[in-house]
Image (cartoon, rainbow, N blue to C red):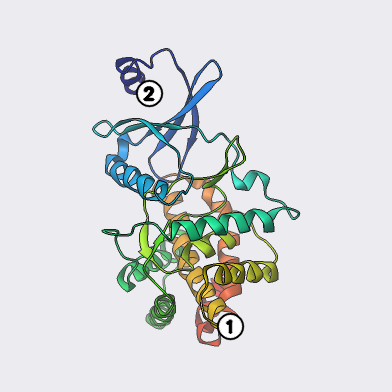
């Protein structure tokens, strides 16, 4: 914190008070800078400076298609500091309820459609290798290290076959759009002016049309009525103009969700075991529920359901 204060002094911001705003699942930290009635957010990426250029680049790409991302006020790429516009403290998760979630989600879906118009040139692909790499985190970190399970050769083969099937269906759907990758209720904000503000977009890739949609609608931190989620998913399909029947689109949606939630089981376990961030353990039951609910709809995934229910 002293190095941050020294930097603020050096750029003429020494008279701004600083308080912890938040930390995320990575090694970034956020501080709120305040002077009288004015506030900004300082993002400290000094522990992972390599994440800063992608953040600045994605910020520019999203701004160019009118997605509301925080304006960058000051940047020091060498030290890993950014001073950003302050979107306030109100995340979607803070305000969502049974009366408003459908309307708020439609607004957030409209933002997905805008994001998907972003320039994707040079972004890494969500190809099969990466889809599998992410899903493999479940076996290593959730099953073997967190639950301390020794899998048999047959169980490993079952997992491998099913993950391959999930990756294949994820790739059947239209590809090539900008994917935020963590588009959920903690990364969507309501600004003081009532606008939707998007954060935490620096890990964007090029991938499937349903990825951000399922991140939003099957959020690991909050759950809604399944039938209403289907309606909202089809709202996206119709709004974006995809010519595909309901059953096919929902299968794409379900399998993309399986890929994401299988990955997240591994990530939440890894955050606990490797990084000492145990707060995410409480989110494992809902994530696991999403996996079991979706997989139970498709007979070809019964082996995964049986395995996860037995551990």
**Pointer 2 residue:** 1
Q: Residues within 10 Å of mark 2 (few under 14, many from 20)?
A: few
Q: Position of residue 266 (x, y in %)?
A: 44, 61
Q: Number of marks in the image? A: 2
Q: Is residue 250 left or right of residue 159?
A: right
Residue pictured at 42% horizontal, 54% vertical: 270
Q: Are marks 1 and 2 in contact (CB under 8 Å)?
A: no
Q: Nearer the viewer, mark 1 or mark 2?
A: 1
Spot occupied by residue 264 in the image (x, y as percentages of width and height):
47, 60
| Residue topped by disc 1 | 247
Query: Is residue 21 depicted above or below 221 in this figure?
Result: above
The residue furthest bottom is 299
195 or 141: nearer the viewer: 195
Q: Is residue 216 above or below residue 295?
A: above
Q: Position of residue 144 (x, y in %)?
A: 42, 65
Which residue is rendered at x = 64% and y = 53% of the image? 104
| Nearer to the camera, 42 or 133 | 42
How many residues crowd around disc 1 within 10 Å: few (fewer than 14), some, or many (20 or more)?
few
Outermost residue on the right side: it is 99
Q: Is residue 274 left or right of residue 232?
A: left
Residue extending farthest to the left is 78
Q: Quadrant of the N terminus?
A: top left
């Amino acid at each position: 914190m002293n190095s941050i204060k020294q930097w603020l002094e050096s750029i003429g911001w020494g008279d701004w008070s600083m308080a912890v705003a938040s930390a995320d699942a990575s090694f970034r930290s956020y501080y709120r800078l305040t002077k009288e009635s004015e506030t900004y957010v300082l993002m400290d990426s000094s522990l992972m400076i390599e994440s800063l250029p992608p953040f600045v680049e994605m910020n520019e790409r999203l701004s160019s298609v009118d997605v509301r991302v925080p304006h960058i006020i000051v940047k020091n790429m060498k030290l890993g500091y950014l001073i950003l516009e302050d979107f306030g403290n109100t995340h979607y998760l803070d305000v969502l309820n049974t009366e408003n979630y459908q309307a708020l989600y439609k607004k957030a879906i409209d933002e997905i459609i805008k994001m998907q118009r972003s320039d994707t040139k040079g972004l890494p692909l969500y190809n099969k290798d990466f889809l599998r790499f992410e899903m493999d985190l479940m076996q290593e970190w959730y099953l073997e290290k967190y639950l301390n399970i020794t899998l048999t050769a047959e169980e490993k083969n079952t997992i491998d076959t099913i993950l391959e099937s999930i990756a294949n269906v994820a790739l059947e759907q239209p590809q090539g759009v900008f994917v935020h990758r963590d588009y959920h209720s903690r990364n969507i904000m309501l600004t003081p002016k009532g606008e939707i503000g998007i954060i935490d977009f620096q890990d964007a890739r090029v991938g499937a049309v349903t990825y951000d949609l399922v991140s939003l609608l099957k959020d690991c931190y909050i759950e809604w009525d399944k039938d209403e989620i289907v309606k909202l998913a089809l709202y996206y399909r119709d709004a974006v103009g995809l010519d595909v029947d309901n059953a096919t689109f929902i299968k794409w949606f379900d399998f993309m969700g399986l890929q994401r939630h299988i990955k997240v089981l591994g990530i939440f376990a890894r955050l606990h075991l490797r990084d000492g961030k145990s707060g995410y353990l409480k989110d494992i039951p809902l994530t696991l529920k999403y996996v079991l609910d979706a997989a139970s709809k498709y007979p070809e995934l019964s082996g995964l359901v049986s395995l996860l229910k037995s551990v």
